Amino acid sequence: MAARTDVRVWVWASLCLGLLVGCEPAPPVCFELMLECEGVSAPDFATLHREVLQPRCGTGGSCHVEDDVPAGNLRLDERALAYEQLVDPQRDLIVPARPECSHVVRRVTSRTRFVQMPPAAPLTDEETCAIIAWVGAGAR
């Protein structure tokens, strides 16, 4: 029994040390975009937030609003906070200039239950292409 406990302690200590030292994050998982968005001009973030993110994902009754714990710990109701959280490299939600490697793009283009965002009704192709174009242009 003591040997099993020693192994558990060693594994736990190794994990903690790895977190403190700062292990390299896993590279983003890329996928094939199935939606054609050529010719869509990239909106600035203020426009994208005002026309897509805030009304579809960050209003009363939505999942990403001020709450004890918003879904995915992501708030989309306030523009500055939404931008800060989306482009945070530690979160891997957006990979600037690489929509095919961005978690948010994967979620808004999915039609798989429990993956699709927003869950109740998918974004329109126009709304989805606006997100893809913004990310593709560098997410500025």
Image (cartoon, helix red, strand yellow):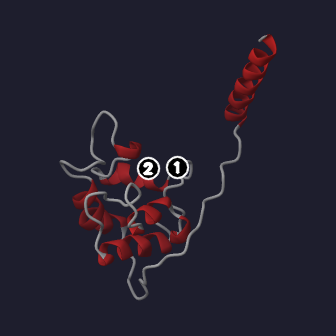
In the displayed structure, would residue 85 be above or below residue 31?
Answer: above
Viewer-proximal residue among 75 and 121: 121
In the rendered image, residue 130, in percent from the top left (x then y), is placed at 36, 74
- Looking at the image, which residue is at 68% across and 31% down? 20
Quarter-of-image position of residue 140? bottom left
- Looking at the image, which residue is at 41% across and 57% down? 115
In the rendered image, residue 80, in percent from the top left (x then y), is placed at 35, 52
Quarter-of-image position of residue 54? bottom left
- Looking at the image, which residue is at 49% across and 76% down? 33
The earlier-in-sequence mark between 2 and 1 is 2
**Residue at the left extreme of this rendering:** 60
In the displayed structure, would residue 50 be above or below residue 89?
Answer: below
Whether residue 84 sits left or right of residue 64 in the image: it is right
Residue type beneath disc 2: Gln
Q: Residues within 10 Å of mark 2 (few under 14, many from 20)?
A: some
Mark 2 → mark 1, Cα distance in angstroms: 8 Å
Q: Residue at label 1?
A: 91
**Residue at the front extreme of this rendering:** 1
- Mark 1 lies on a secondary structure that is loop
Q: Does residue 137 appear in this view?
A: no
